Image (cartoon, rainbow, N blue to C red):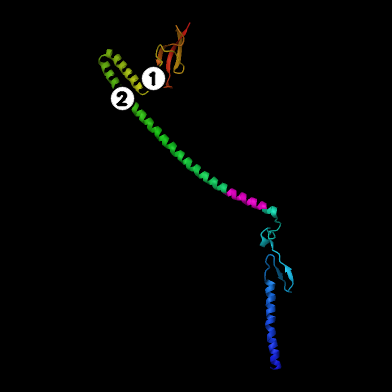
Amino acid sequence: MTDNDSKNGKAADQTPDSETGENAGENLKFTPARDGETTLDQDGEIIDAELTDEEDGEDTDFSGIPGMDEGMFAQVQEMMGKLERVDELEKENADLRHRLGRLAADFEGYRTRMGQDVDAAQGQGVAKATERLMPVYDDLERAVTMGSEDPAKLIPGVQAVQGKVLSIFASLGLEATGKEGEAFDPQWHEALQAVPGDEDDRIVQVYQLGFRMGDRLVRPARVVVSRKG
């Protein structure tokens, strides 16, 4: 072996160790430390490995937000919670408005139907009353015809018509009130005049017959009442 070979061989033997040392240094430099372990710096000295706040997750780093601390962060979280609650309330309010609109529409439809039913009932009532009164017109027509031929027959004919009208009223639920001899009742009767008599508040004359339907007054009777002494 020549001197050059020896030199070359020695140089060749030294080259990998140098590269290995440099690579090892680089590996030591960039290898992160684990919890409870030690690592080496670039000069090969042992340094302590510490976990950062981001790794242990115990504390929040506010370094990216100037002037922010834990108290302010808690207030921000509280405000965000309130804003979320506001969104929920707005949704609930919108839902209630929608339901109220539907309820109003349903009520309007119900009122319209009720109005139509009332109109129909009134029309049926008028038709029923008219149908009942048609025979009265026929009787009046006959009474007038008979009275023109013989006036003595006119009064009995009119009285017969009057009785038929009262019968028709009774069939419709009307009850006559305010006849002579009845006790005066201001709920059903209207006194037009008071005259001396044997007792107080007794109907002695009827100007206009009254009618009632159950407990409801249809028309008051207009009468003359007596007063004692």
| Left or right of residue 179: residue 33 | right
Instruction: Return the x and y of residue 189 as percentages of the image width and height.
Output: 44, 17
* Residue at x 68%, y 79% (from the top left corner): 20
The image quadrant that residue 61 belongs to is bottom right
Range shown magenta: 74-87
Q: Amino acid type of disc 2?
A: Met
Find out whether residue 86 is within the magenta segment: yes
Outermost residue on the left side: it is 149
Per the image, the residue denoted by label 1 is 175
Compare residues 199 and 82 and report the one nearer the observer: 82
Find out whether residue 215 is within the magenta segment: no
Per the image, the residue denoted by label 2 is 134
| Left or right of residue 44: residue 126 | left
Q: Distance of mark 2 from mark 1, alpha carbons?
A: 20 Å
Give neighbour class at mark 2: few <14, some 14-19, many 20+ (Cα, 10 Å). few
Q: Main secondary structure of the magenta part?
A: helix
**Secondary element at image label 2:** helix
